[in-house]
Image: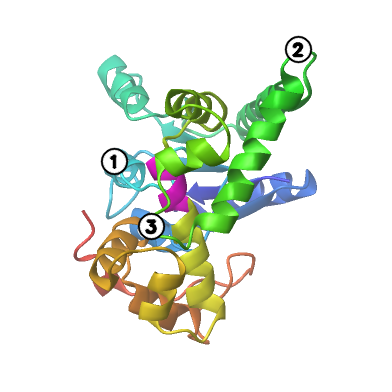
Amino acid sequence: MATILLIHNDLTLQIELKTLLEFQGHKLVSVNSGKEALNLLRYANLDLMICDIDIPEIGGFDFLKKIKKKLLHKQAPVMLLTSTNDHEVRLKGFELGVIGYLAKPVDINEIQYQINNLFTYRNTIIDHTLYGSHENQNTDFQFVKDFYDLLALNFGSPDFSLNKAAEALSMSVSTLKRRLTIYLDTTFSDAVKEYRFRKASDLLKKSSLSIEEISIACGFRSLSYFSRSFKANYFLSPVQYKNDANDSRLVAFTSKEKLAYNEEEYTDIS
């Protein structure tokens, strides 16, 4: 099952696409503007975003630029909805990482086939990478498992480094860097930061620890650095994130209700 975000203010399209995709076992959440989408992304892990190029408040291209700057969502696939055939406009989207375009007025069947083809292709690649018949398949799978097991044991140490990870995995630094690029499409630094951010966000939502205690538990050297880097990726400070998570008005991502949005939260998004 895939989790898909639709950023489009056409209620009819939202209802039709939600009915179609949920019948196929996917989950669709719809928002009307770029600002609402940015708010939602603080709490959601997505498999795909479908975004109108002319969304209100933050245009489609500006929305793309913002999410691609954020570690947690820079690799999320995005399709753009557009009525233009302008070659330069379409090229701009591809330069920003768009995986495809959908024409407006929207053909609901075209969206269905595009989404199904995307996830079929993705699953084929995953199956081939993990289970395909090549001589190094066990080594490949074991590396990913060993690396994340190592992260789970060491993310709380601020001294956890590339050199230490390579030594623990019994490989050279260059081999570790190469395998992270091939199998996870990331760097060591980004992998560690993403893991720490996800652990920190989970603790902020579910624990009674103070912000400083969470910062220390997740391996950050200073509270100020943790606060700055967390806000850079979640659009909120740790304090605001924790307060929102404990606010009875905030509805979980899986709910059918709308999130409570606060326009002031977006004044410093860069």
Element assignment for label 3: helix
Measured along the vertical axis of the image, is residue 37 above or below residue 211?
above
Q: What range is drawn magenta here?
A: 189-194
Could you say which quadrant of the image residue 241 lies in?
bottom left
The residue lying at 34 percent from left, 63 percent from top is 230
Vertical position of residue 129 compared to residue 51: above or below: above
Numbered label tally: 3
Marks 1 and 3: CB-CB under 8 Å? no
- Secondary structure mostly seen in magenta is helix
Residue at the disc numbered 3: 38
What secondary structure is marked by label 2?
Answer: loop
Q: Which mark is residue 201?
A: none
Please state which of the two labelled residues, at mark 3 or mark 2, is closer to the viewer: 2
Q: CA distance from mark 3 to mark 2?
A: 43 Å
Residue named by callout 1? 65
Question: Which of label 2 and label 1 is nearer to you?
Answer: 2
